[in-house]
Amino acid sequence: MNIEKVFVEKGISLTSQRRLIAETLLSSSKHLGAEELFYLVHKKNPRIGLATVYRTLQIMRENGIIEKRDFGDGCSRYEDRKDMHHDHLICMKCGNVIEFDEPTIENLQMKVAEKKRFKVVTHRLELFGYCNKCSK
């Protein structure tokens, strides 16, 4: 994702601090919480405060760049808004989050909604359990 292009298209001022926050979040393979993100960007630029991280996350959410997730551990986490919908498997022991896309599940959900005459606007599927490592 070209962060500069996205921010300009959305009419958002791209300061060096916002750029670092956005690049760090969007390049991460993890679903980061605000405090985790703060720790990572603060190591690179100690002048960035936690409030700046929260404000930047809010701006990015309001402009549809990222989504906020709650995986049941009391911590909001963030991820980029991917073009393709995906769901999550969440390990209740280690907190590992595995993204997956399963067309059969998506089709079944739409069939149920159609049968019930329900117009789906958005949805999310999060399955909680134990990853292979933790279930041993």
Image: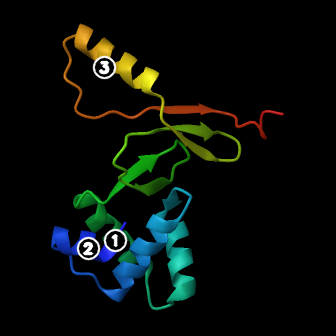
Task: Decide which of tag 3 and tag 2 comes sooner along the chain.
Answer: 2
Dot 3 crowding, Cα within 10 Å, few <14, some 14–19, many 20+: some
Looking at the image, which residue is at 45% across and 21% down?
104
Q: Are marks 1 and 2 in contact (CB under 8 Å)?
A: yes
Secondary structure type for disc 3: helix
Give the numbered dot on residue 104: none
Q: In the displayed image of the protein, which residue is found farthest to the left?
A: 11
Q: Is residue 47 above or below residue 37?
A: below
Residue 43 location, x and y as percent? 57, 84
* Nearest-to-viewer mark from 3 and 2: 2
Q: Label 1 belongs to which residue?
A: 2
Instruction: State the CA–CA distance, disc 1 to disc 2.
Output: 5 Å
Instruction: State the CA–CA distance, disc 3 to disc 2.
Output: 34 Å
Instruction: Identify residue type, mark 3.
Output: Met
Task: Decide which of tag 3 and tag 1 comes sooner along the chain.
Answer: 1
Looking at the image, which residue is at 38% across and 16% down?
108
Seen from the viewer's position, the closer of residues 81 and 91 is 81
Seen from the viewer's position, the closer of residues 96 and 34 is 96
Q: Label 3 belongs to which residue?
A: 110
Q: Label 2 belongs to which residue?
A: 5
